[in-house]
Amino acid sequence: MEADPSGGDIVTRFSLQSAPGLVSLAVAARRSDDPALLWRHTQELPGGLPAVAAPPDADRARAALSALADPATGAGVLRAAANAPEAAVIVDCGRIDAGSAAMPIVRSADAMVLLTRAHADDLAHLARRLPAIGRWTAHPAMLLVGDGYSTAEVAREHGVLPLGRVPDDPHGAAVLCGRPSTLRWRRGGPAHSALGQIAHKVANVLIAEQAQAPVVPRQVPANNQPMPVLRAVPGVPANPVSTNGLRFATPRPPTAENGSRGGYE
């Protein structure tokens, strides 16, 4: 399901009809909480995947998301669909922040997967937001995308253990996005591309974690309640972050070289 407040892409990308989709789902959700309602507002993508398409227009997308976020009407539709046997609802919320129209969907999700590139500028922005992100949902996780700092380096510097890394796979991405590709997979189509394989692994990890989690009401920590940020690395505390997104320097203990002046590293 597309839930990016800036508007959707798949209607244009796959030449879909404007309805059914996110807007029609938001209207229907005011009158029904049928678990099958969400599936009646999907369109089939090439390959058979049902998708709820958001309108390309940002104003219409935000209006529909606001209606679905209303706990008295739309919020139960996604939960009812996700609770159905053998069902999984994956929602693309775009670039998320605390004021996003998609935030109520994030807060009610069973798991949130945050994607970020692993270059210094991307990680500097992320570092400032980690404490807040950890309070958005009870089960957050982080995936690195493409090259850049290693998983171990990110874990050490931020005190957060990434779930894994999504490889750069332009051929697999092209096919999954409906664009032509000259690459041919020996079996299984794009599901056996590098991108398809990592998606399968991530899904299995999330399913296993949900199966192991105790059945308790989902509670998102209060804004003033301290909590571990995402997946804390054992033995590595979450590092304090300055207002410019960089780690606070750690005072060095006095040594024979620096005497009692101290220092920073």
Image (spheres, rainbow, N blue to C red):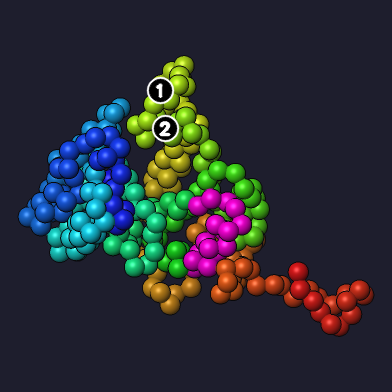
Tell me the amino acid under the disc marked 2: Ala
Callout 2 crowding tier (Cα within 10 Å): few <14, some 14–19, many ≥20: some
Q: Name the residue under label 1.
A: 189
Of all residues shown, which one is farthest toward the bottom?
A: 260
- Residue at 39% x, 45% y is 211
Q: Which mark is residue 153?
A: none
Extreme residue in the right direction: 256
Residue 106 belongs to magenta span: no
Quadrant (top left/top right/bottom left/bottom right) for the C terminus: bottom right
Q: Whole-percent x and y of residue 47? A: 30, 27
How far is disc 1 from disc 2 in space, using C-alphas?
12 Å
- Residue 108 left/right relative to 156: left
**Image mark for residue 174:** 2
Q: Quadrant of the N terminus?
A: top left
Looking at the picture, tell me which residue is in the foreground, 114 or 101. Answer: 101
| Amino acid under disc 1 | Gly
Residue 169 spot, x, y in % from top left: 50, 34
Is residue 209 shown above or below 185?
below
The boundaries of the magenta stretch are 116-131
Q: Is residue 239 visible?
A: yes
Q: Is mark 2 on a helix, strand or loop?
A: helix
- Residues 209 and 87: in front is 87
- Residue at x 62%, y 48% (from the top left corner): 148
Q: Residues within 10 Å of mark 1 (few under 14, many from 20)?
A: some
Magenta portion: prevailing SS class: helix
Query: Splitting the image into 4 quarters, where does residue 190 fall?
Result: top left
